Structures are given as structure tokens and as C-alpha cells.
Amino acid sequence: MGNLWLIGMMGSGKSTVGRRIAAITGRGFVDVDSLVEERAGKSVASIFEEQGEAAFREMEGAEVRRLSAEPAPRAPGRVIATGGGAVLPPAGVKAKCRTAGVGGLAAPPRV
């Protein structure tokens, strides 16, 4: 069993659902936004404010590429919650599909 990538719009529950799936299935959990924050030393909101969306998307893409290039850990793999924009470049989706399954989450917009 390989990695399971969760994709979806911001606020659709990728991190929350990802943690639950990981706990139920005995997989590790990785949150791409958290990885970006760790490497940058600041929050996603600060990155957007100080450097703009394009800079954040590049950082996010770098983490997705890095995770995609890593061999999946021995069974049962990891659950990886992507950022909301991780599927914008088509290459990002292809990279995920090479390493495992991809699950999409949808949530109704708040009124």
C-alpha cells in the first residue's frame, strides 16, 4: 500500500480527515502546509502577506515534489494532506499519482 494524497479546496477538511484516516489505518500523517511553515519559519498567512501567493505556491510545490520523489515508507504508507493550491499545476497531480492514490474532498461553501 502506498501513500494516499488528499486534495481539495481550502477548508474542505484535508488535515482533519487526513489525521483520522491515518489513525484508523495505522499510517503516518503529513500536512504539506505544516512542512512549508517549518521550512519557512513562519505561518502560511505570513508567507502570503510578506511574499505573496506565488512564493507560497512555489514552496508548496517544492514540498509536493520532494514528497513525491521519496519512496513511500513500507506498508502502510502515509496520508498526505496537500495545500489547497497543490493541484493547480498539472505536474503536481501527475507527481502524486505516480506515488499512490489520490482522494478528493469537497465541502459546500459557507453562507
Image: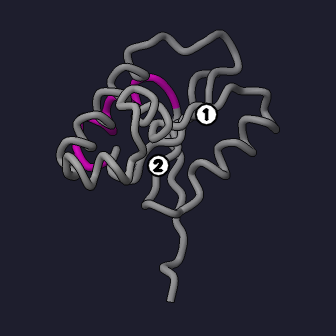
How far is the residue under mark 1 from the one under mark 2?
11 Å
Q: How many marks?
A: 2
| Residue position marked by numbered label 1 in the rendering | 79
Q: Nearer the viewer, residue 32 or 108?
A: 32
| Neighbour tally class for label 1: few under 14, some 14-19, many 20 plus, Cα within 10 Å | many
Where 48 sits versus 24, above or below? Answer: below
Determine the image quadrant of residue 39.
Answer: top left
Residue type pointed to by label 2: Ile
The figure's colour scheme reads: one colour
Where 61 sits versus 10, above or below? Answer: above
Instruction: Please state if 74 lies on the left or on the right of 63 as rendered.
Output: right
Query: Regarding mark 1 in the picture, which secondary structure is present there?
Result: strand
Residue 9: image location, x then y, percent: 43, 61
Residue type pointed to by label 1: Val
| Residue position marked by numbered label 2 in the rendering | 7
Query: Regarding mark 2 in the picture, which secondary structure is present there?
Result: strand
- Which portion, as a residue range, is magenta? 87-100
- Does the magenta portion include 63? no
What residue sits 65% from the left and 10% below the top?
A: 74
What residue sits 20% from the left and 46% below the top?
A: 51
Determine the image quadrant of residue 42.
Answer: top left
Residue 29: image location, x then y, percent: 64, 31
Residue 104: image location, x then y, percent: 50, 53
Which mark identifies residue 55? none
What residue sits 37% from the left and 53% below the top?
A: 45
The N terminus - image quarter: top right
- Does the magenta portion include 90? yes
